[in-house]
Amino acid sequence: MQDLFVKANGIRLHAIDWRGNGPVLLLAHGLTANAHAFDGLLAAGLNNYCRIIAVDLRGRGQSEAPDMGYTMAETAKDIIGLMDKLQLEEVMMGGHSYGAFLSWYLAAYYPQRISKVIALDAAMKMHPNTMQMLGPALGRLGKVFGSFEAYVQQVKTAPYLHFWEDAMTSYYQADVHTAADGSVATIPNAQHMTEAATKVLAEPWADILKAVTQPVLMCNAPGIYTMDAPLLPEENARETAALLQDVQFVKVDGNHQTMLYGEGARQIVAAIASFI
């Protein structure tokens, strides 16, 4: 594992190079997440099949947080700039949730740079109550906690977390700044994340998805997230899959969050190993 810091598209980006064998898989996390969101997949052996590079998108993790530019177009330019600096002419592009939308966007608008797409729990239509269902996750933004331990205890009360494993700890550690007095504050800015969410919803996804010609692996986790429902119902995921020209569809255990850990992570790794 190596931390990478590069200047791309005018800002400083952080990424983690997990090394590994085979082709490069560049991974982009969910809306308010960070590069360590994929630690559970690494713990399940993903880098036995490819070289993994996970990026902190602008305004998340250790990447720079400019006041503006949280559109798909600018975020895509960040990724292309990162690839250029790392001398990666072509990659497999994968992502979870928001990162999956970004992967489709890149595949459509930069087709010569993306060989395959891996989309984890994203679709043109999520659950109709998605914004309400994301309340517990978005509610942490802008808050200060007395210690990291206090923050984790709060996180563990989220309705979508039914178990805990070590790979989750590193993800939440990367989610906060620690002050001299030991208190922690979440890194993602609520205004920036609201802009990112609004902008991604405004994209013409039906047209973008139809323009994706690369092979796509879609993994859907239809377990209960909040409000007694999955964040991405299977029928919605399959509706999106039908728009793609070359797609493999796989259901995995867990919900929108827990799919990245435990049995869900092992099933995703198996699906990716077969796909590539």
Image (spheres, rainbow, N blue to C red):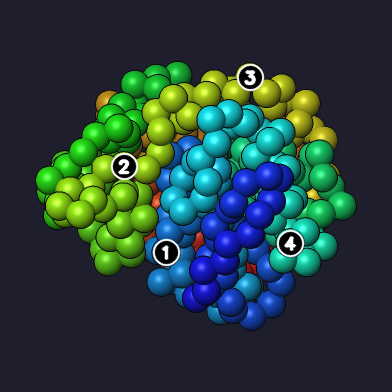
User: Gap between marks 2 and 4, in whole Å?
Assistant: 29 Å
The disc, 4 or 1, on the residue closer to the chain's N-terminal end is 1
Give the labeled residue for mark 1. 39
Q: Mark 3: few, some, or many residues within 10 Å (few <14, many ≥20)? A: few
Judged left or right of residue 138, residue 116 is right
Nearer to me, 197 or 232: 197
Name the residue carrying label 4: 85
Where does the image place residue 123, in percent across and percent down from the top left?
Answer: 58, 33
Towards the viewer: 113 or 77 = 77
Q: Amino acid at mark 3?
A: Ala
Between label 3 and label 2, give the one nearer the viewer: 2
Q: Residue furthest right?
A: 112
At label 1, which amino acid type do we have? Asp
Q: Quadrant of the C terminus?
A: bottom right
Residue 16 vertical placement versus 193 (above, below)? below
Q: Residue at x 30, y 57 (%)?
A: 173
Dot 4: few (<14), some (14–19), or many (≥20) neighbours within 10 Å?
Answer: few
Task: Name the residue beneath numbered marker 2.
Answer: 186
Of the residues under marks 1 and 3, which one precedes in the sequence? Answer: 1
At label 1, counting other C-alpha atoms closer than 10 Å, the crowd grade (few under 14, some 14-19, many 20 or more) is many
Q: Is residue 69 above or below residue 129?
A: below
Q: Is residue 153 visible?
A: no
Residue plotted at (27% across, 43% down): 185
Q: Earlier in the sequence, mark 2 or mark 4?
A: 4
Q: Earlier in the sequence, mark 2 or mark 1?
A: 1
- Which residue is found at the position 21% from the left and 38% from the top? 144
Q: Position of residue 77 (x, y in %)?
A: 73, 43
Question: Tag 3's secondary structure?
Answer: loop
What's the residue type where badge 2 is placed? Thr
For disc 3, the marked residue is 202
